[in-house]
Amino acid sequence: MVKKLTEQEKRDRKVTTVVLKIRKFEKQHSEDIVKSACYRYNKAIQDRKSAEKDIKEAEERLDRAKRRLK
């Protein structure tokens, strides 16, 4: 009988898989390049989330302005 994995165990396995892939990249590229790539990836995610938040706020302000004009 197979044990059903919890969400945390599933996440841990996925993280381990990604770490192994990063280690493969380190064999092909220097550690500095891999760290820089990870930093840029994280920065891109943060920038995207920030932009999405700004868009949402701008749309809310636009909706409020339209309601005031009615």
Image (spheres, rainbow, N blue to C red):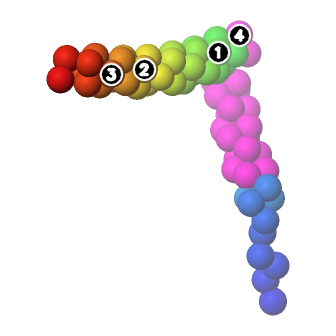
What quarter of the picture does the C terminus occupy? top left
- Residue labelled with disc 2: 57
Looking at the image, which is closer to me, 45 or 65?
A: 65
Q: Earlier in the sequence, mark 3 or mark 1?
A: 1
Instruction: Give the quarter of the image for residue 22.
Output: top right
- Residue labelled with disc 1: 39
Question: Which amino acid type is shown beneath numbered disc 3?
Answer: Arg
- Residue labelled with disc 4: 32
Residues in magenta, as a range: 11-33
Q: On the rendered structure, is 29 left or right of 63?
A: right
The residues bearing labels 3 and 1 have C-alpha atoms spaced at a distance of 38 Å
Secondary structure of the residue carrying tag 3 is: helix
Question: Which amino acid type is shown beneath numbered disc 1?
Answer: Tyr
Q: Earlier in the sequence, mark 1 or mark 2?
A: 1
Was residue 45 drawn as part of the magenta stretch in this picture? Answer: no
The answer to whether residue 24 is above or below residue 69 is below
Crowding around mark 3 (Cα neighbors within 10 Å: few <14, some 14 to 19, many 20+) is few
The residues bearing labels 3 and 2 have C-alpha atoms spaced at a distance of 11 Å
Judged by depth in the image, the label closer to the viewer, 1 or 2, is 2
The residues bearing labels 1 and 2 have C-alpha atoms spaced at a distance of 27 Å
Question: Which amino acid type is shown beneath numbered disc 4?
Answer: Asp
- Residue labelled with disc 3: 64
Crowding around mark 4 (Cα neighbors within 10 Å: few <14, some 14 to 19, many 20+) is few
Question: Which amino acid type is shown beneath numbered disc 2?
Answer: Glu
Q: Earlier in the sequence, mark 4 or mark 1?
A: 4
Q: Earlier in the sequence, mark 3 or mark 4?
A: 4
